[in-house]
Image (cartoon, grey):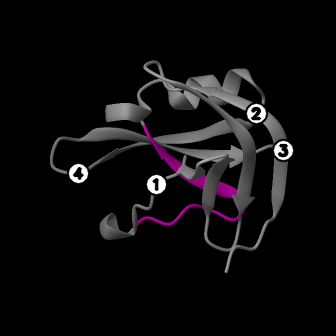
């Protein structure tokens, strides 16, 4: 069950290789951030519980690698999130960001 803590319609997110448009939804219970598009849900946040990491209330994790490279900066520039901290995770010490959702 999706519990919406906040949502913002008419958001455009640039992934570098594709730009998508929809409603940004923050589910604080699940510590999740999604973009609801005409095609369904696009996951913006990532779950790092495999590394025993849980974001603080009001926050989510966003990975900084692969298709999400530059995504956090894009969201910050739009005033949708604020970076709280950066973390090195996984066997390759990839960067993930804990962000406060500021919709």
Q: Secondary structure at mark 1?
A: loop
Closer to the camera: disc 1 or disc 4? 1
Which residue matches tag 2? Answer: 11
Query: Label 1 vs label 4: CA separation?
Result: 13 Å
Relative depth, front residue between 39 and 55: 39
* Dot 1 alpha-carbon crowd within 10 angstroms: few under 14, some 14 to 19, many 20 or more: some
Specify the quadrant that holds the N terminus: bottom right
Q: Is residue 56 magenta?
A: yes
Relative depth, front residue between 80 and 100: 80
Query: Label 3 vs label 1: CA separation?
Result: 19 Å
Judged left or right of residue 2, residue 92 is: left
Q: Which residues are magenta?
A: 53-63
For the point 79% across and 66% down, the residue is: 4
Query: Label 2 vs label 3: CA separation?
Result: 7 Å
Closer to the camera: disc 3 or disc 1? 3
Which residue matches tag 4? Answer: 90
For the point 75% across and 36% down, the residue is: 80
Q: Which mark is residue 46?
A: 1
- Counting from the top left corner in percent of width and height, residue 89 is at 30, 49
* Marks 2 and 3 close (CB-CB < 8 Å): yes
For the point 52% across and 29% down, the residue is: 71
- Counting from the top left corner in percent of width and height, residue 26 is at 72, 57
Among the two numbered marks 4 and 2 on one chain, the one whose residue lies closer to the N terminus: 2
Among the two numbered marks 3 and 4 on one chain, the one whose residue lies closer to the N terminus: 3
Q: Is residue 10 above or below residue 99?
A: above
* Marks 3 and 4 close (CB-CB < 8 Å): no
Closer to the camera: disc 2 or disc 1? 2
Which residue matches tag 3? Answer: 8
- Counting from the top left corner in percent of width and height, residue 78 is at 75, 24
Residue 18: tell me if it is visible: yes
Among the two numbered marks 2 and 1 on one chain, the one whose residue lies closer to the N terminus: 2
């Amino acid at each position: 069950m999706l519990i919406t803590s906040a949502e913002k319609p008419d958001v455009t997110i640039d992934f570098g290789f594709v730009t998508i448009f929809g409603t940004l939804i923050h589910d604080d219970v699940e510590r999740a951030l999604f973009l609801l598009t005409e095609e369904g849900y696009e996951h913006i946040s990532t779950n790092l519980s495999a590394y025993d990491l849980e974001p603080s209330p009001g926050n989510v994790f966003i990975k900084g690698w692969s298709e999400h490279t530059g995504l956090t900066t894009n969201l910050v520039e739009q005033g949708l999130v604020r970076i709280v901290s950066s973390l090195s995770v996984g066997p390759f010490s990839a960067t993930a960001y804990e962000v406060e959702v500021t919709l």
